[in-house]
Amino acid sequence: MQFYSVLLLVSLLLLLTISEASYPPVCTSGFTLINGKCLRIFVDVSTHTAAEKTCKGYGATLVTVKNSIDNRAIADFTGNNANLFWMGLYCFDSDVSKCLWDDATGSAEVYDNFAAGFPHIALGNCVYYSVQGALAGMWLSSDCNDRRSFICELPASHADPCPYNYNGFCYTFHNTASTYTKGQKICEQECGNLASIHSANENRYIMTFGGRATKEDLLLGGMWPADDVYNWVDGSLWEYENFDPINVRDSVCVIMSNGDSRPIALGMWYSGECKNEYSVVCKRPAGIQCPPNPTIVPVTPMPAVQSFCNSSVMAPSEITSPHFPYNYYNSDFCSYQISTLGSYNVLLRFSTFDTEKVNDVVTVYDGDSTNDPVIGVYAGSFYPFTVISTGNKMLVTFKTDKSNTRQGFSGRITSYSTTESGERD
Ligand SMILES: *[C@@H]1O[C@H](CO)[C@@H](O)[C@H](O)[C@H]1NC(C)=O
């Protein structure tokens, strides 16, 4: 027991060291790091639409400016290369609150630096930046068909030789037709998961490069195993979605359209059958070393694993129904007290879940007792899914009735920090 605790502690410390190693920010595709984001100047003039298209080709947007420091940095960065640059801002009306950023972060109401009398849509809806002269640093609007230089913007990432490195993550695209299970396996071999998406920019990036690299619609790492419970297989928070408005939620998997095979626009998501085959997009943190030959765990013959039924268990670990991978017993009851270090949340990922519908029930509580709020009640067969506690304790109970047994469940417990997920600009 002593030895086991030490082992747990060591592996926890290792995990912490890996996740907290500080990666110096880097820029890809010839962009330059300015103020924490990556910019690239295109001096040759083009229309606003053509400029946007060029940026999109790098998975980028036209430059956005959210504060006065960014605004000054642009003037310093562009120097004497050109004077007038398109920005990623479009005004529907001559009112700052009607000017929207290309990266879907809302209007310029929070910060703007329009010259007096602007935006002025009688002159045009597209916004540009003036570097020199009396209007240096100011924004103006003009006809979107005017031709100007422009600046593209990408988020900074971590150093990694992977070909698709964006905002701290590496993406890979696989043309191999894959079901959900097969797709996730492909991604796990690269130390990643089927991709989660957390912003319009990330969606655009995956759509742009995934669309080029693959033939079929793209399988993402999203799941909705139960009503209104959405989750990402990598355990990150569900904080963004891009479902096609005509999507009917009739299946469990989340697919991104490549605009070809369905009447669903490129980059929009729809609900798809997990057993159907799609192209695959994987995502892993940039800068991690993936062992070249991941150890293959032999599966036959399988001894029943330690279940932790009626025990306390500390992350990282694994809990299963009794007797797993063989069927559980009738008229049984188990409780699992799960905890992790104080500053972390408990992430429980059920990789197998197969119980008798309605009658053999797993209940997950957000705390250490049955008086705490219920995160979910699950009975039946589900694809892998994830539940996360809001604190550092989770209670799982499993109750079976007196007839019919099935394989049961197996779930991996890890520590999870809600503040580390996703991307923040
Ligand atoms: C777990 O504890 C409950 C009582 O709290 C008991 O009824 C049940 O049989 C125990 N399960 C196992 C597998 O030991």
Image (cartoon, rainbow, N blue to C red):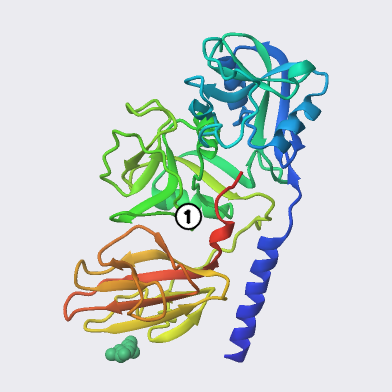
Is residue 330 in view? yes
Instruction: Please name the residue shown 53% across and 16% down the image.
Output: 125
Quarter of the C terminus within the rendering: top right
Quadrant of the rendered image containing residue 120: top right
Residue 173 or 167: which is nearer the viewer? Answer: 167
> Which residue of the protein is positioned furthest toward the right in this rendering?
80
| Picture coordinates of residue 384, whole percent (x, y) | 39, 59
Name the residue carrying label 1: 237
In the image, the residue with mark 1 has its CB under 8 Å from the nearest atom of ligand 1:
no
Residue 56 or 97: which is nearer the viewer? Answer: 97
Q: Is residue 130 above or below residue 160?
A: above
Instruction: Please name the residue shown 75% across and 32% down the image.
Output: 72
Instruction: Please name the residue shown 67% across and 70% down the image.
Output: 14
Is residue 212 in view? no
Quarter of the N terminus within the rendering: bottom right
Instruction: Please name the residue shown 26% across and 39% down the image.
Output: 248
| Picture coordinates of residue 215, whole percent (x, y) | 45, 30
**Relative horizontal placement of residue 405, taking residue 186 as reference (left or right):** left
| Picture coordinates of residue 402, whole percent (x, y) | 17, 81
Q: Is residue 305 above or below residue 108?
A: below
Q: Is residue 149 above or below residue 286?
A: above
Residue 24 or 294: which is nearer the viewer? Answer: 24
Quadrant of the rendered image containing residue 368: bottom left
Ligand 1 appears in which quadrant?
bottom left
The amino acid at mark 1 is: Leu
> Which residue of the protein is positioned furthest toward the front in this rendering?
116
**Relative horizontal placement of residue 246, taking residue 113 as reference (left or right):** left
* Mark 1, other Cα within 10 Å: few <14 / some 14–19 / many ≥20: some
